[in-house]
Image (spheres, grey):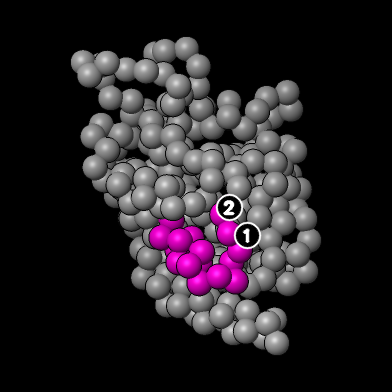
Amino acid sequence: MPDGPVGDPGTRRDAADPVDPVVRLGPRVDESLAVALERLRAERGARVVVLDLGEAEGTWDDVAHRALLARCVRAVLATDLPVVAVLGDRVTTATCAVALACDAVVADRSTSVQIAPPAVGGLSLTLPAAVGRLRARRMLLLGEAVTAVSAADWGVVTHLAPSGSTARARADAVVRALLEADALTLAGTRRVLDADLAARLEEALAHEDRTASLLARHAAR
């Protein structure tokens, strides 16, 4: 195995080299991320996806940006590959929406999560499922910043980097564990676990979009 992080995008390979089983994407939630996620089925030899989630493009009172976010969430759920999200220091509404569609969410202890209404990107489904009905309201309605430790306790973060380590190092350990598992078993289990979310997602996205559009018109008065 080469030195450096698993799936290090800086590692160059010749055509004869084996395909890297780790696809690393990010850090921006933008058009290029949506396209890359939608093309994952064509990634020959890929086994795990790592999303380094940083900034999100645009404002979510804009219909085009909401559609872009919905594309990213749909693509994460549609792939047969396990997806590991690595959070940055500051997690806002859009990056939280993408992260909660993933299979593992890794954070540093310095990370904070602060989201604001309206719910977009399926958050009306995924956030209550992760943290519970009342905590979801606390996060969305009050906009309180949540520490990494609390986010892990509540269910937004699945893996918290230990003191003296980093989210990237913790994510590499998660990736190694996934690479050791049977790919078909992982894909089948993901489909079963995501079946209810996938069945309800489009209705939730449509409801979120109508609400966001209404609130945007109200704010413009």
Nearest to the observer: residue 158 or residue 68: 68
117 w.r.t. 99: above or below = below
Residue 212, percent across and down?
A: 58, 77
Residue 123 visible from this viewpoint: yes
Which portion, as a residue range, is magenta?
A: 56-72
Check disc 1 and give the amino acid type.
Answer: Thr
Check disc 2 and give the amino acid type.
Answer: Ala
| Identity of the residue drawn at 43% across and 43% down | 83
Q: Residue 93 carries which label?
A: 1
| Identity of the residue drawn at 37% across and 28% down | 180
Residue 124, percent across and down?
A: 56, 71
Gap in angstroms between the C-alphas marked 2 and 1? 9 Å
- Figure quadrant of residue 9: top left
Quarter of the rendering occupied by the C terminus: bottom right
Q: What element carries label 2?
A: loop
201 w.r.t. 171: above or below = below
Name the residue tied to disc 2.
Answer: 56
